[in-house]
Amino acid sequence: MLEKIKALHEEIAAVAASTPEEVEQLRIKYLSKKGAVSALMADFRSVPAELKREVGQKINELKTFATEKINGLKETFAVAEDSTLDEIDLTRTASPMSVGTRHPLSLVRNEMLRIFASMGFTIAEGPEIEDDWHVFESLNFPPDHPARDMQDTFFISRDTVDILLRTHTSSVQTRVMEHAQPPIRIVCPGRVYRNEAISARAHCFFHQVEGLYIDKNVSFADLKQVLLGFARQMFGPETKIRLRPSYFPFTEPSAEMDISCDICGGKGCAFCKGTGWVEILGCGMVDPNVLKACGIDPEIYTGYAFGMGIERITNLKYKVKDLRLFSENDVRFLREFEAAH
């Protein structure tokens, strides 16, 4: 029995394999239930009692040796397979990943701010949750003023002080005027909220960019020149503008501005409803009452203000007909603007 164990030990010591499949065949030959080592265990019953201890020890040593030999061969092939990793670019993703792009509203917002920055305007921002004074009262909206009905407001609290979601970014203008003395030249981008039914042409939240310029001897002609420059940089050098009288509580005189339709060139089409003009913003000279409320002397300073919706400008620039597309996160829609970067 000891001679058989020794011979099998020498046989196993000499084995080699050239493929993982050959290693598996060696494992089956020597270590499976019907393998050579298991056969020795079966023959162990016939060993004389005085030799059982020695023979049993030798069989266990053989089994351990055979197991280590087979595992060593397996590891050889595992290392060989791992060496192929040197040829793999580990920085690559497991599968193709599409690259994200900036949202169309962000593209247009950034372009608008770039244009106004080139004219000397700086960016000012403020809170979306506001109080009544900054959103309405400081902007010439008395408590019973009918102009408050122009904007459906989301109120958060109506206790001692009305707390609400701002309906326009004009509240940022009043916050700046409270703490800064003229000259003031700012644009205020941000999200605003109004309690409106959601449709292709309206939403309960949208985005604005409002502008304010306060200084000595500021005139309506200054306002017109800034808006003409903005329109031509945003929509093209051939763009024309027109100003129509309007009403806003915080400006006097007030106007709404149209641009010439860039689809039909001002000749009239379905997009501009046959008029040749498309409205883009409201504007006017800052009402003296607004200056007084914010601690600025209207006898010394004058100013103008304007405001426009970023969604509206995006609609005109990219011909997007449904406002809801901007907030639905449809990747197919967003991919259409990859070339705009």
Image (cartoon, rainbow, N blue to C red):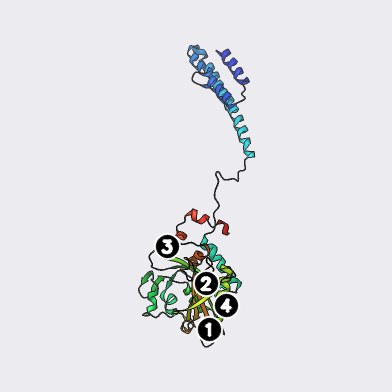
In the picture as drawn, the residue positioned furthest to the left comes out as 159
Contact (CB < 8 A) between labels 4 and 3? no
Q: Residues within 10 Å of mark 1 (few under 14, many from 20)?
A: many
Q: N-terminal of the two: label 1 or label 4?
A: 4
Q: Quadrant of the N terminus?
A: top right
The quadrant where residue 205 appears:
bottom left
Q: N-terminal of the two: label 4 or label 3?
A: 3
Q: N-terminal of the two: label 1 or label 2?
A: 2
Q: N-terminal of the two: label 3 or label 2?
A: 3
Q: N-terminal of the two: label 4 or label 2?
A: 4
Residue 308, horizontal then vertical, whole percent: 49, 71
Q: Quadrant of the C terminus?
A: bottom right
Residue 126, horizontal then vertical, whole percent: 49, 71
Report how far apart the C-alphas of labels 1 and 4 lie in the structure: 16 Å
Q: State the SS at label 4.
A: helix
Q: Nearer the viewer, mark 3 or mark 1?
A: 3
Q: Is residue 48 left or right of residue 72?
A: left
Q: N-terminal of the two: label 3 or label 1?
A: 3
| Pointer 4 residue | 225
Q: Nearer the viewer, mark 1 or mark 2?
A: 2
Report how far apart the C-alphas of labels 4 and 2 lie in the structure: 14 Å
Give me the disc on residue 200. Answer: 3
Residue 93, horizontal then vertical, whole percent: 57, 45
Q: Residues within 10 Å of mark 2 (few under 14, many from 20)?
A: many
Q: State the SS at label 3.
A: loop
- Amino acid found under the numbered disc labelled 2: Ile
| Pointer 1 residue | 302
| Pointer 2 residue | 259
